[in-house]
Amino acid sequence: KVNHPLRVGSDRVYLQGHGFAPTFTVTWPTGETRTETLQFAPDDATTFLSSGAMRFDPPGGMFPDADERRKNQIAIEGLFAPTAAMHGTLLSSAFPAMLDPAVAIDIYKGDAGLDTGSPQSLFSLNAELINQGRLVKQDRVNLRPGESTTLADGTEIRFDGAVDFVNLQVSHDPAQQWVLVSALTMMAGLLVSLLVKRRRVWVRVYPAGTVSDGERRTVVELGGLARTDQAGWGDEFDRLVARLLGHDAAGRAEEKNA
């Protein structure tokens, strides 16, 4: 189901994508073969018409010289249709399930760039090699499973069929519960900070300007400011004055406020 991964123990397995991987077999005139299965990229999500490319290196015994072997590599590029629908010689797909598979491919011979060490696209050939004439087209054919075509030098390319492939993501997060606990703790702290009443209180203490009965008096002034929730701040401030200065001072403060 969507957003319901397969769970294996503490691992979660997500399906990221799927498609088809055609299989081709190249048989050289010596009888040696190379078989390769490689995924093609789905170009149409509705019919799963897919495109891709393959590269084959000839057997080492055929061409002992590395340069000569490089000039005789085989490359395939084209389309795969899980349910073939032919429009003349043009191939398209009528249905995403593999009911009547077929391929429409271009076959090249030459330097496919297998041993250059340079990165290449998995789904297309290097156009620069084709434009430079280092990779030359030999044939263009439509094939169904089991069908083959033979090049002028006797090399045979056979389409063997296709298999399904899936793209999976496996996730393992042993600290997931701790992350949840930390997130909840942060949210709780944020809520507490929003609920706390923010108050500011200033106290100023200075000696009185006159002396009474031989004693010097000290004047204490208090001020307060409510940053939020000012309702009821007056009573709260009076209670604070009473705690700091005593009830008599609080009473005088109330009379002064009146």
Image (cartoon, rainbow, N blue to C red):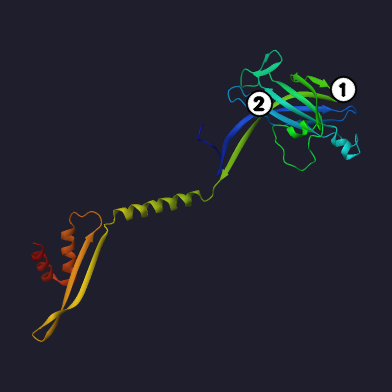
The quadrant the C terminus occupies is: bottom left
Q: Residue 137: horizontal and vertical position, in percent? A: 79, 26
Q: Nearer the viewer, residue 17 or 107?
A: 107
Q: Which residue is mark 2?
A: 50
Q: Residue at image x 19%, y 77%?
A: 206
Q: Name above or below for residue 243 compared with residue 167.
A: below
Q: Is residue 56 visible?
A: yes
Direction front: furthest residue: 132
Element type where label 1 sits in the image: loop
Indicate the quadrant where residue 196 lies: bottom left
Q: Nearer the viewer, residue 20 or 90?
A: 90
Horizontally, residue 211 falls left or right of residue 13, namely left
Horizontally, residue 70 falls left or right of residue 127, namely right
Q: Name above or below for residue 201 compared with residue 56.
A: below
Q: Name above or below for residue 51 compared with residue 171.
A: above
The amino acid marked with disc number 2 is Ser
Indicate the quadrant where residue 143 lies: top right
The amino acid marked with disc number 1 is Ala
Q: Residue 189: horizontal and vertical position, in percent? A: 36, 55
Q: Which residue is mark 1?
A: 152
Element type where label 2 sits in the image: strand
**CA distance separating discs 1 and 2:** 28 Å
Circle 1: is it few (<14), some (14-19), or many (20+) Cα within 10 Å? few
Q: Residue at image x 12%, y 67%?
A: 253
- Disc number for residue 60: none
**Given this view, does label 1 or label 2 mark the residue nearer the observer?**
1
Direction bottom: furthest residue: 214
Q: Residue at image x 69%, y 24%?
A: 79
Q: Residue at image x 64%, y 23%?
A: 49
Q: Name above or below for residue 75 compared with residue 212.
A: above
Q: Is residue 99 visible?
A: no
Q: Nearer the viewer, residue 236 or 91?
A: 91
